[in-house]
Image (cartoon, rainbow, N blue to C red):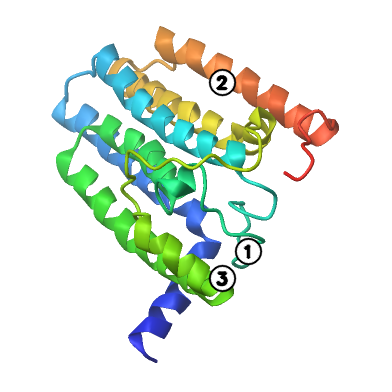
């Protein structure tokens, strides 16, 4: 099999499991984090450092939110079976970078990796993320090139693949929809706070042999959990978050 075909095949397989990448890193990261606390007596994070890490994760959430607020139905979805693109997104965040959702993912997961505060683990994450998503992006771009031809090629020639340019924003045709964000992002939003809370809970148990959350994370988890339950209920039980064409 030619290298190009092999990369496409690998990308399509990884595409189906792209939401699973943070799981092994979170598990491994928690093990390393607790090992350093228990056996090496590593110093406690300052609250400013923890909030800084959370802010990086929320930056990723913001990037995803701006992207999804403008995207129509049939694009930028959570589908895992096959590549889908009912139309080519070239405006909004897609006028600044070709893969804004993956950029958002990078920051959301990187926030947790930074929280562990191990330099080699951060480097390992960046390398694995790049190798993993490089193949997914390669397969996606092959699909889009075959479907949209010259239109797609012209867009790629002026739009960076992952590091966004800071000018050239093109206003999307659709109006911004906060409902589209709320119904699609509440899982990831809560998962971010839940993971930080889990790290804090585990750390306190190892250090003090007590299960409790520090005040900041207790309030954060309570608020994010309430938002999660409300939005999940609205999505599953009502049509309040339904938006025509989204």
Which of the 4 quarters of the picture holds residue 16?
bottom right
Q: Which residue is mark 3?
A: 148
Question: In this view of the protein, can residue 13 be seen by the observer?
Answer: no
Q: Residues within 10 Å of mark 1 (few under 14, many from 20)?
A: some
Q: Residue at position x 29%, y 30% from top?
A: 115
Q: Classify mark 1: helix, strand or loop.
A: loop
Q: Residues within 10 Å of mark 2 (few under 14, many from 20)?
A: some
Viewer-closest of 153 and 209: 153
Q: Which residue is mark 2?
A: 224
Which of the 4 quarters of the picture holds residue 202?
top left
Q: Which residue is mark 1?
A: 84
Q: Residue at position x 49%, y 15% from top?
A: 220
Q: CA distance from mark 2 to mark 1?
A: 31 Å
Q: Residues within 10 Å of mark 3 (few under 14, many from 20)?
A: few
Q: Residue at position x 17%, y 25% from top?
A: 42
Q: Quadrant of the N terminus?
A: bottom left
For this view, does 140 lie left or right of residue 116? right
Percent position of residue 193, x then y: 47, 26
Q: Tell me whether circle 3 and circle 1 mark residues in contact (CB < 8 Å).
A: no
Which of the 4 quarters of the picture holds residue 178?
top right
Q: CA distance from mark 3 to mark 1?
A: 12 Å
Going from the N terminus, do you reach mark 2 or mark 1 first? 1
Viewer-closest of 195 and 227: 227
Viewer-closest of 58 and 27: 58
Q: Quadrant of the C terminus?
A: top right
Question: In this view of the protein, can residue 197 be seen by the observer?
Answer: yes
Going from the N terminus, do you reach mark 3 or mark 1 first? 1
Q: Classify mark 2: helix, strand or loop.
A: helix
């Amino acid at each position: 099999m030619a290298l190009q075909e092999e990369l496409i095949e690998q990308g399509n397989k990884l595409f189906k499991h792209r939401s699973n990448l943070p799981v092994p890193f979170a598990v491994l990261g928690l093990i390393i984090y607790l090992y350093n606390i228990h056996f090496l007596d590593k110093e406690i994070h300052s609250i400013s450092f923890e909030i800084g890490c959370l802010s990086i994760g929320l930056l990723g959430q913001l990037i995803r939110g701006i992207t999804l607020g403008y995207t129509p139905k049939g694009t930028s979805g959570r589908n895992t079976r096959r590549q889908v693109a009912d139309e080519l997104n070239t405006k909004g965040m897609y006028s600044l970078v070709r893969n804004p959702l993956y950029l958002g993912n990078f920051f959301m997961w990187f926030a947790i990796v930074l929280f562990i505060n191990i330099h080699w683990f951060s480097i390992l994450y960046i390398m694995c993320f790049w190798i993993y998503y490089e193949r997914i992006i390669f397969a996606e771009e092959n699909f889009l090139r075959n479907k949209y031809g010259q239109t797609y090629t012209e867009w790629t020639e002026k739009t960076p693949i992952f590091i966004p340019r800071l000018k050239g924003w093109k206003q999307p045709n659709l109006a911004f929809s906060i409902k589209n964000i709320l119904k699609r992002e509440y899982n990831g939003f809560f998962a971010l706070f839940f993971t930080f809370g889990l790290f804090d809970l585990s750390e306190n148990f190892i250090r003090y042999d007590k299960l409790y959350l520090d005040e900041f994370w207790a309030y954060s988890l309570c608020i994010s959990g309430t938002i999660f339950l409300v939005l999940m209920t609205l999505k599953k039980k009502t049509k309040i978050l339904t938006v025509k064409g989204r």
